[in-house]
Structures are given as C-alpha cells and as structure tokens.
Amino acid sequence: MTEFLQQVIIGLRIGSVYALIALGYTMVYGIIRLINFAHGEFIMVGGYTLFFMIPVLMGFGLPAWTSVFAAIIICAAVGVLAELLAYRPVRKKGNRMTALITAIGVSLILQNLAQAIPFIGPNPKAITQDIFQSGRIDLFGVNTNWTSIFTIIIAAFVMVGLQLFIHKTKIGRAMRAVSENKAASTLMGINVNRTIVITFIIGAGLAAVGALMYCAQYRAVMTTMGSMLGLKAFVAAVLGGIGLIPGAMLGGMLIGLIEALVTAYISSSLANALVFVVLILVLLVKPAGIMGRNVGEKV
Amino acid sequence: MSERAIVLKTEKLGMMFGGLKAVNDFNIEILEGELVGLIGPNGSGKTTVFNMLTGLHIPFEGEIYLMGKRITGMKTHKIIEQGIARTFQNIRLFGEMSVLENVKTSFTKDVKYNLFDTMFRTPKYFQIEKDIEDKAMDCLRIVHLDDKAAFQAKSLPYGQQRKLEIARALATDMKLLLLDEPAAGMNPTETSELIACIYDIRKKFNITIFLIEHDMSLVMKICERIQVINFGNTIAHGFPNEIAHNPDVIEAYLGEEAVENA
Amino acid sequence: AEGALEGQTILIGNIAPMTGVIANYGTAVDNGIRLAASEINASGGILGGTVVISTKDNQFTPAEAINGFNALLSEGAVAIIGAIASSVTSAITGPANDEGIVLITATSTADSITTEDDYVFRACFKDSFQGRMCASYAASQGWTKAAILYAKGDAYSSGLRDSFVAAAPDYGIEVVEEQSTSDTMAVDFSSQLATIAASGAEVLFAPYYYDTVGPKIIPQAREAGYLGAIIGADGFDGTQDVAVGDLTAYENVYFTNHYSPEDPSEVVQNFIAAYTEAYGAESLNALAALAYDAMYMVAQAIETAGSLDHDAIRDAMAGMHYVGVTGDMTLDETGTPDKSVAILTFVEEDGKLVQKFVTSQH
Amino acid sequence: MTDLRKKSLRGVITNVIMVALLIIVIYILSVSLSDNNYRLKLVPIIWHLCIFILLGTSLNLTMGFLGQLTLGHMGFMGIGAYTAALSSLALERAGLFIAKTAPPLQLIGVMLGCSLLGAIVAGIISLLMGIPALRMRGDYLAIVTLGFGLIIENVIANLPFAGGNGLAEGTASANLYQNGLGINSRLQAQYVYFPILLTIICVAFMFMYTTSKYGRAIKAIREDEIAANASGINATYYKILTFTISAFFAGLAGGLYAISTSSLTTGTFTFANSSIWNSTFIVVMVVLGGMGSLTGSIIAAIGMYMLNYEIKNGAWVAAMPQFLQSIFAFPMLIYAFVLTIVIMFKPFGLMGTYEFSLRRLLFRKSERAIGGEAK
Amino acid sequence: MLKIEDLVVSYGAIQALRGISLEVNEGEIVSLIGANGAGKTTTLHALTGLIPIKSGKVHYQKKNLRKVRAHEIVSLGLAHVPEGRQVFRRMTVIENLLMGAYSRTDRAEIAQNLTKVYKHFPRLEERAKQIAGTLSGGEQQMLAMGRAMMSAPKLIVMDEPSMGLSPILVKEVFNIIEDMHKEGITILLVEQNAKMALSVADRAYVLENGKISMSGKASELLDDEKVRQAYLGA
Ligand SMILES: Nc1ncnc2c1ncn2[C@@H]1O[C@H](COP(=O)(O)OP(=O)(O)OP(=O)(O)O)[C@@H](O)[C@H]1O
Ligand SMILES: Nc1ncnc2c1ncn2[C@@H]1O[C@H](COP(=O)(O)OP(=O)(O)OP(=O)(O)O)[C@@H](O)[C@H]1O
Ligand SMILES: [Mg+2]
Ligand SMILES: [Mg+2]
C-alpha cells in the first residue's frame, strides 16, 4: 500500500508539471485553435532564462525561485514576438493548416537557434542550485520531497487563478468570444489582436512557470528539452478536454499517474505507448476529452 | 386517396436534448406525390424532425417507415439510399468544389465501377462518368444552374446556392424530398421563381415533397396539407385554408396580420 | 617514405550528429578530430601532406549519414571517421566495405559494427566488453545482488544491459530487479527507482548518458532511498559537470571509461591541456578523447601505408598497435581495440565534483 | 469517342511521353556524368526522392483530399520498412536470397515482394487503427494519429525480433542492424528504375483515385461530412478506404527505404527529430506543396529534400563567407526560416489545389473548345 | 448621422461595391434592398470595419470611420446585427448578451438593458443558460438582435434580421425595429422582405450589382412598378 501511495505521489508530481504546461497549450489552443508546437520551445527558453538568472539573483541575496519572474518576462516576450512576426501575418492570409506549419517552423527556429547560440550550445546544463527548499519529507510513511509538494500546490493554485480569470474577468470573456468568432467579437468592441497577444503572454508565462517546476525537479536544461515534454503536455490537454482549464489540469495529473503506475506495475518501457493507448481509449468514449462537453453540431 | 401508397409514416416520434423534449409524439403520413408543409414557431422542432428522418439524430423514441420499410436509427447514407433526400436550413454545400461536382457527388452511391476501373480507366469507367455527367447536367438544368456548372459552389450568390442544394438532393434519385426553408433569404420575386422550380421538379420526377418554410406566401400556395408543431407537439394539421384560420396556429405562429394577407 | 605525400592534402571525413538531440556528442567528436588534425599539421603533417577535415552533419539519421558518406567519397576523402550512434554508423558500414574505404568509428560500441576482414574499425571497446567489466568490478567489490535500469529502445543502453546480464552469472551476480525506460530522453525515473530501492539490490547498473545520470538518475535514486552503489559505463563521463544539489549523492558511483583524465601520462595531460585551451572544458569527455585517438590512428595508418591508397591504408589499419589518450591498444581481427578499461568514481573537492581513478581492468 | 475519353487519351499520351523523357534524361545522365556524380550523388537522391514523393502524395490523400490531419504518417512507413527488412532477412537466413549476388529477376522479385508485403501490413494496421481513429475529427484525429505513430515506434522498439541483428538473433531495441534487402550503391544505380517506375505507378494510381468518384466523395467529405452523408456517401467507408490506401503507399515507401538503407532505427519513423525524416516534415511537405494537389506534393518533396541536401552537402555553402557558413551549419535553422517565409507568402501552398498538367499546356486551345474544364 | 460617399470595396479581383453613396439622418429608418449578391452585406461590413475599404468616404457623426479601428466603432454607438446571426455558439445565451455590453462599463445600465432585451424576447430569458449553438435559427436571430441592443447603440445596422423567422416573429422583429426607432435609435436596415422593410422605413435605397440604382421615400418606392416587379414579387 505504501508503495502504491509512493507511486501515486510520484505520478502527481510528474503530472503537475505536465498540467502547468498543458494549461499554456490549452489557453492558446482555446483562443486561436492553434496547436502551438512552439510551446515546448517556450519552456526551453524559460529553462535557459532560469539557468542564467538563478546565479545572478542569488548573488543579490534573492531566493532562487524569484528567477521565474525573469523567465516569465522573457517567455512572454518570445511568445509575443512569435505571434507578431509569424503567427499573425500568416493567420491573416492562410488557414489553420498554414498556422500549424508556421508553429512547426517557429519551434524549429527556436530550438536550432538555441543550439547555434554559442553560450547556450548543444551541451545540457545542470542547474546546481536548489530552487525550493531541499530535502526529503515523510508523508504518512510515503517518501517525497518539498519540491514535489510545492509543484503540486502551485499547479493547483495556477489552475484556479486561471479559471477565475477566464470566467470572471472581462478580458477572460473577451478571450472566449474571440475563440469562437473573431468578426462578431470585433463587432462587440473587442480588440481581437490585442486579446490574442494577451493570450500568448499568459500561455508563454505559464510555460515559464512550468519550466521552473521542471527545473526544480529535473535540474537540467537542454535545447531539445521541450519537444517530448510539450507533446505529452499537449496530450494531457487533449485528454482532459482541450480548451478547458480544469481539463488541462486533470489531463496532466492523469498522464502523470498513468506513467508512474504503468511504469511500476506493467512495463516501464511501454509507458509512453500506454499513455497514448489510454488517450485513444478515452477519446473513443468521450470524443471531446474527459471534461469536454460534446456539443453536437446543430444541423 | 387510399390508392396512393404511403411514402413516409412516423409513429410517436420523439427527441430529447438534455432535459429538453424538442419533439414529442410526432405522427405523420405522407402519400405518394403529395406536397406537405411543416410549419411552426422557431425552435419548435421542425428541423429536428428532418434530422431524425435523415438519421442525423437517432430518435429518442418512435418509429419511421419509408415506403412501409422501417428506417428508424439507420445511418444517414443508408437512409439516403432508401430514397430520402434533403436540403439544409444553413446551406451546406461543398464550397471548394465546382457546381457540377457538387451534383456529381450525389451519384457516388450508384456508381458501380471499382478501384480497378479507376486505375485502368476501363471503358466502363468512361461510360459511367459520362452518364453521371449528363444526369448531373439535367439536374442543374432544372434549377437553371446549367450555365454555372464550372463555377466554384461558394462563389454563387445565396439564392443560387439554395437551388444548387436542391439539385444535389435531386441527384440522389429519391422518392421523398425534404426541403428545410428553401426560400429563406430570398426576396418575393426570387421566391416565385423557386415555386415554379418546385412545381417543375414535381412534374418531372413525380416525387413527394415535405417542406419546412416560414414564408407563408409559399406555404399557403403550394402545400396540399400542412402540419403545425409548437414546442415539439403537433397543434394542428389540415388543408392550408383550415390552418390559416386555426386560432391556435394564429396565436402561436401566424399572428393576426398574416391571416389577412394570406 | 619521408615526405612521400609532400604538398598533398589528405581529406579525412567526419560524419557526426552536429545538430539535434545528440549534437553535444557530435561537437565533442568533431573538436577531438580537429584538435588532432591541427596537431598533426603543426608537426609537419602526415609524410608532409596536410590533413583537411570535412564534417558532414548526419542529423542522427541513417539516411543522412549515407548522404554524408557519399558526399565525402566524391569529395575524395581517404578515410572516414564516423558516426557516433551505432544505429547510424551501421548504415554506413556496408557502403564503406563496398566502396573499399576505411571507416573508423570513435564511439559506436555495438558489437555488430565491426566484422572480420573489412574496412571498418573503431577506437572504443565494444558493449559486450564494457558490460562484462562492470560486472567484474561489481563482483570484485563483493556486490552480488544487482538491479538494472536501462533504456530499452536505445541500442547503447540495451546493448550494455545485455552484456551485463550475460556476464553476471560468470561473476556470481544475481540480477534481482530490472527496470527500463523506452528511451534515454526520459526525465523521471522515480517510479523505477522506488521499485529498485525496495528490491534490496546492492548495486545498480544504469547504462545511460551523463546528461541523464548527473541531474536525474543519481539524485532521484538517492531521493527514492536507494543508497547502494551505482555503476555505469562510459556514458557516465561528464556527470561531474552536470551534478546537482547535494554532492554526497554522487558518492559510491563507479563507471568504466576509456581513459582517466587523472592519468599523469604525457599524452593524456597534453590532450587535456590542448583541448581545454582550444574548446574549453565543457565538452571535454571520453568521446572527444576517442575521436582524437581515431584521428591519430588514421594518421598512423597512412604513415605506415606510405600512400593514400585505400587498400594500403586498410591493411595498415588492420591489427595496428597504437598508444594514445585512451590507452595502449591493439586492434583485434574484427577491428576493435583490445585495451584496458579504467574504473573511475566521483569525489567532492572544494565543493566541486571531480573524477577519481580507482583501478584499471582488463 | 466521348469528350471525356478524348481528353483522357491525350492525358495518357502526354504522361507516357513525360515518363519516357524522364527515363531518357536519367539514362543520359548515367552515361555522361562521372561515376562519382552519378552513382554517389544522383542515384541516392533519386531513391530518397521517390520515398519522399510517395510519402508526400500519399499523405496528401488523407490531408489534402480527405481533409483529415494525420501526424503519424511515418509510423506506417516504419511498419513497411521493418516488415520488408525482416521478411527479406528471413529469406536470407533461410539461404534463399543474398542481395549482393542475386540474379536480377530474383532481386527485383524480392524487392517488390517484400515492399508489397510491407505495404500490405501497413495497410492492414492502418485499417485497424482507422476504424476507431477516424471517428475523431480535426485536431483530435491529429493527436490520435500522432499517438498511433508513437505507439508503432514504441512497439517496434519492444519487439524482440525487430532489433539487434533481427529475427532469431534479435533483441528488443530501436535499431535493426541487419537487413536482407539493403543493397549497395552499385546495385542501387543498376536498379534505379525500380523506385522510379514504382513511384510513377503509385502516383498515377493516386491521381486516378482523386479524379474519380472516390476523389469526389472524399473531397465532399472534406468540405462537409454531414452533407456528404446526406448525399448518400458512406463517409466512414471512404474515410477508412482512403486512410488505408494512404498507409499502404507509406508502407511501400518504407520498403524502398529498407532497400536503400541497410540499417533501420525507429527514430527515423517518429513524429519529430532533428532531420527531415519524420512525420512532421511530411505534413509540412503536403501543406507547402498545396493540400489537394498531388503535383504540389511532388514539387514540395523535391524542393524540400534538395534544400536540405544542398544545405548540408552543397559546394556553394563552403564558398560562402565564414559567418554565413556557421549559420548553415544548422540546416534545420535555415530550413525553418525558408519554410516560414514560403508559407507567409504562399499560405495555401505552392500549388493550392491546382494540378500541373502537360496536357492542358499542349492541348489548351482545342480543349477549351470542347468545354467542361472547370475554371 | 451617417454619410457614405463613393464607397468601393472589392474581394480580390471582384468589385463588390462600385462606388455607392448613401445617407442616414438621425432618427430615421433607412432600408437597403436588393437581390442576392447585390452587395448589401458588403456595405454593412465595410461600415463597421470588418472588411477593408478600397476607396470612398464613410462619415459617422462627423467622424471618419476609416480612421477608427474596427473594434472601437461600437463604442461610438454604432452596432451591427450581422447576417447569419454570428452568435457565440459555445457560450450561453446570457454570456452572449453580456458580450454585447462589452463596450459598456456601467453595471446598472447593463442590467437595465438586459431587462429591456428580455422584455422584447422572453424566449431568451427562458433559455438564458442554454448554449447558443443549440438554439434554433429563430432563437439565434433573437439573440443576435438582443446582443446588439445590449451596447445601447445610437445607430443599429441590421443585416436581414427577419431571415428564417416565423411570421409572428417577423412581425415582432419589425415591432422591435419600430420600438427602437421610437426610443430614438437610428436604423439602417438590410432586408429581403422588401415589403415589410419599405413599410417601416422612412427612406430606402435599392442596390443592384454594387451600385445604387434607385433611392427615395420608402412609400414611393413601394409603389414603383420596377421595384414591385423585381423585389416584391408582384
Ligand atoms: N443538438 C442539439 N442540442 C441541444 N438542443 C438542440 C439541438 N438541436 C436542436 N435543439 C433544440 O431543439 C429545439 C428545436 O430545434 P429545431 O432546430 O428543430 O427548431 P426549428 O423548428 O427548426 O426552428 P427554426 O424554424 O428556427 O429553424 C430548439 O429549442 C433547439 O434549441
Ligand atoms: N468573401 C468573399 N469573397 C469573394 N466574393 C465575395 C465574398 N463575399 C461576398 N462576395 C461577393 O460579393 C458580392 C456581394 O455580396 P454580398 O454578400 O454583399 O451580397 P448581399 O447583397 O448581401 O446578398 P445576400 O442577399 O445574398 O445576402 C457577391 O457577388 C458575392 O459573391
Ligand atoms: Mg429549423
Ligand atoms: Mg447579405
């Protein structure tokens, strides 16, 4: 039983990182129906910002985690640049497929640019400093650490905040309106372009928070770190119901749990495949994801 | 009356959406060659009836018979094969395809060549392709779109798009044609043209038509019988002039003025 | 034949993943080769001929490796050093034999890469040898209960695992727990390590690369409560640069390597000094050292052959004896060196982790 | 003779002329180019191009014509490649076939047989996947096919007979070192007509497919699935059929890959990696060429492959200033920039849905007189 | 109040509007009628900035609308009920209505407007929590009009508001139009139902192939033989 609980805690911890990243995916997807393949690279940008900023900020006597603010700023800037320079011009002229290809392009550019920049380069870099309080703790006989606890709590906190933001604020409602019908939104007085930029800021900002959690946990950054992570997070978002904030959270947690439990009890090398098997099975039963409402098309 | 076959018959048809009963105890019998209208306030469940008839919604309860054969719960394309065709309230054309291709697609189910004929372009392939091209042009001619055959469907003006939908439905070679608000978005002049077109179709194909329409000038003029639903329940059925003076219908649907105009 | 190649350029090809997920290995190897080449040229070249390196990026993909190979061939390369990952290298071993050009791989350890009587050689030892050495060292320390954690889909990792498992009975080692990941890119091993910690293993064999071992496997293992020995192969080299958190976690970690940076011998110290000066210490690892040696081996073969004739170089290569950074070696009949392996460990020195030589095994 | 037939006959004639021209050009090149340039450069390029053309056009069937975004196309190529490699390896181990010494007819027979087997297995597996997957739409289908692609990759890596030295000597691993089919560059040069003819036949088939009732049906489904159903089209059937055909050709491309590459690794058949050999790039290829234009896919396949090839191997790169060279050391970077810029100026791809037709060029006048050509 | 001069709009190579001029004075109802594809919708889109204008002048309350960004137009008191309803399909009815008040900030005013909308369309109040995409066509039309009313506009432009509505609702829509008019809202109405449109309007324009072919008092146009032939089906 303890062993099982142990695995559950591990699952939740992995899951909260996925969940945080999935939130960013869901935000952007929810508004402009774009699978932002570059989101994984936003995490990478966040990771490197942390890598460079932690020693600087600690030099000023600040705690390591405060570097996340720098990461948020840089990530948001990258997100906004991607939107202004690539996504927006293409969105005006093309269709969704065109936008998808642009996202792939941006993702490749970011990843390869990072490798090409001499002080980043292809070598993985370790984050040697503890980002949160270090050390193990014993939770009802289950062995875990502070980082895990913080990760889970922060993920939950971010989710609730975001949910309130989307549903209770004016900007949030504007985002949802834009996500449905841009022309009608304009007629309501919504500045569509600005709303999309805000979405990218939030999405990329979340990637920065995700990067913090990732780095606190896994302690290393690499130019290709975002690809698989981003992909799994996207799967999480779809599993929970894409476009839905609680869905991203639930999906992330589930993917984490499935991974941990499959690894522990079935086959660790098939964990990746089984995650997708679960996703496919869920989608077959609930085509809009676990929390997605299947709004049939009105004929 | 009894000589004519019953083309469509429904028994206690019902549909639920969540907690909402959109259609309730819907019964109708349509005889061969008839032109029957279905009217009712917005949201009363008319389109939902059509959707059930064409398998887009699986009825919550009740049965549907086409030419005496039970078709309840069949897949859409099967129902179409049985001989029902329809148009949509919100136009659903194949926008990127040409007008002619739009009509040709409706022959797909009847085209009997296979992958082998496709690959090797056998004489059979050419024969069949030529046949359906001719038939498709015939359908277009009826709705006066033959000169637009090469246009992209989405570039047509609204009224012509509606006509193209009708042509596409005609091409499925049906016994029963369902028209969902064919005159919506047309001005009275265009509506009269449409009426002429519908008469034409009936004459040429000798088919049965079941239509939904809010334009009373059209309904009262061409429908032989009318059924009225409100909140999913049938509140009246009968001949046009009966309906026009039915107080329930006037209250729920027509309003006072419309009667004077009819 | 002093000066037999005077005034000629000697084109040596390098095929490596210069971009993408394992670009760090590609750059290390390229640096090693170029360092050796510039040293050779500085001391008068090979028989007077100047070495020129042409690098082709294989993007970690077999098909691109073939393109690179063909391009090098038509550029007129006399020998090719190439491909890092065994999966990619094996795509060009056939072509090398068909075209009759020497292919020496610095780092591909899969057993099947080299076969008898052909044009393919390597500077590293092969998986079956390294896995066996790990088992042998474990036995020598009296650890008899072993657990294994490896990447099933990765040829390097699963190859080492296979050889460790094969050798274990010979040394009286029992494998009590086996866990895996699908590839080496995994980041979270907590589940697997929790199971391993509960298995009562005394030693954990974890054939992964340093970027995974350093920040992830070792700290996560200690966190999961596994405090026993951790042993790995040459992929552990570099762990010291990516160690995180409490460095005591890295105690009781051992690995086999091609050389020891501590080795006081002149070749080794010279290499380390020269490499650090040219490219910095970050990418300095055994891969760079192997590539450096591979280049010198090619040079030695050309010198022996006295010409740029492909077959002559091949014949000079076969069975060659060579002393380099990664040891004193003789190529066996398949073209794989027979050399000793260094067992290294990590210790903390002035708040930094450094490698320490433990013993040498054969 | 009907107009339709007349046009078609002209089409056949022009196509035959084009194929003949292509083959003559290659023959002349084989005679006139130096061995280095012909065998070491042109021949591998031709083999690889055939693979990419098959992948691009076949994916265009599902993406462009059927309108379903699939992100796991390379998975089917993987199935084809592994099946072809392992089945040929079985023949080799049984002592029935050795690629290097096989007589021409036997070699062609084995290449064709094993590739077809790979294609069939890919087709069958895609059928099994398609039945549940194609119930999904849009981005959900995309993510499910991506998932299937990764599952295929993961499962292959876990098959005990599909790794290491294969079959009885195999272990579960992502790499298959032994491949009975992998032929050397001399043989590849000698049999260069094999991939060319195979590709031409396949593309011709796909072209026929898209211009028949099948093509009309799937285009209708792309435009509006509900309306297609309501026109009597069995959308599920046509979707699965098209998906399967598409996977079949990807499997065939896998067979060609196995022939041209002597060792396989699942990393080639994945969703994304650092080269152009992955599912993402096939999607990019289809969009860049124009969704719904087979000619577009062919042009994009050639263009994209050559771009990547030239960035990495082109002599002109070495002639550039040092600064530019150091940027060109990152092929994917250059590539991504080109890609993004092209898509910005040509958002609907190079060809849109337009098909290039020599016939139209040659007989334009007389055909306009016949009429019926959509404008 | 609104003055359009020589407006030209094109979609690629197709010129949809070939220089039209029209005027709407404060307090008027002006109808714009014309056959399918005449360019009515295009005119309204150009007005509220949904499509770019090629040339011509558009002035609203002395302001050059070409200089105002699309999303700022509604806060000038110009609301648009678009063709085909364009409701936010996945939002609830009430959320749709609140979106209409996006440019308003005064909560009391919003609440007041909401009551007014509910008074005109009780059905919307019944279905306040329903997802708009599942409403029937007519219900969606009511929602689109209600939504426009939520921004408390001075000028409403409506694109075929009666399309797909039951006779009783068509009457209701025209009643609402007259109500709005009485409340002092100026209205530019595009309609296929030319008879109704002309009977509520003060003045009207007839659009033919992207050009104004006729204009004048609505009652006069109603009696015009050409208009009757082409648009009234008589
Ligand atoms: N897919 C669905 N999910 C939930 N409710 C639905 C769905 N389709 C229709 N409804 C509801 O069922 C009722 C009947 O709708 P229907 O479309 O049949 O009306 P209608 O009579 O055709 O109206 P109109 O004349 O306006 O087209 C409406 O209240 C509508 O909101
Ligand atoms: N997005 C578009 N792209 C190309 N042409 C268009 C587009 N929208 C409209 N058109 C063309 O512009 C012309 C005017 O169209 P518009 O929609 O303004 O007509 P309308 O008078 O509103 O007709 P309806 O009564 O059908 O609504 C038509 O010929 C139409 O085909
Ligand atoms: Mg309806
Ligand atoms: Mg309009």
Image (cartoon, helix red, strand yellow):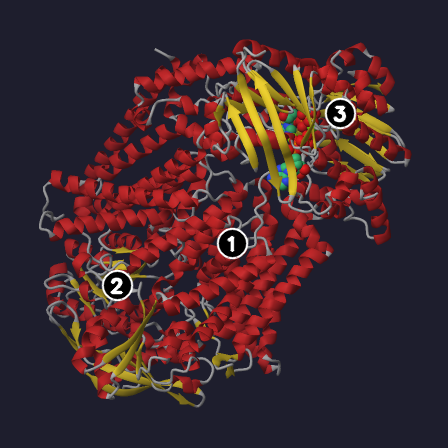
Going 26% across and 51% down the picture, which residue do you hit? D82
Answer few, some or many: residues within 10 Å of disc 3's Cα (few below 14, many 20 plus, some between 14 and 19): many
Quarter of the view holding residue E153: top right
SS class of the residue under badge 1?
Answer: helix
Quarter of the view holding residue D369: top left
Most distant residue in the bottom direction: C350
Residue D245, image x and y in percent?
Answer: 34, 37
> CA–CA distance between discs 1 and 3?
48 Å
Label 3 resides on the chain identified as B
Label drawn at residue C187: none
Q: Is residue E216 left or right of residue C93?
A: right
Label drawn at residue C86: 2
Q: Nearer the viewer, mark 3 or mark 2?
A: 3
Going 8% across and 50% down the picture, which residue do you hit? D95
Label 2 resides on the chain identified as C
Label drawn at residue B249: 3
Query: Along the line of sight, which residue is nearer the eye, E41 or D96?
Result: D96
Q: Amino acid at mark 3?
A: Val
Label drawn at residue A238: 1
- Asked if E217 appears above or below C122 in the picture, the reply is above
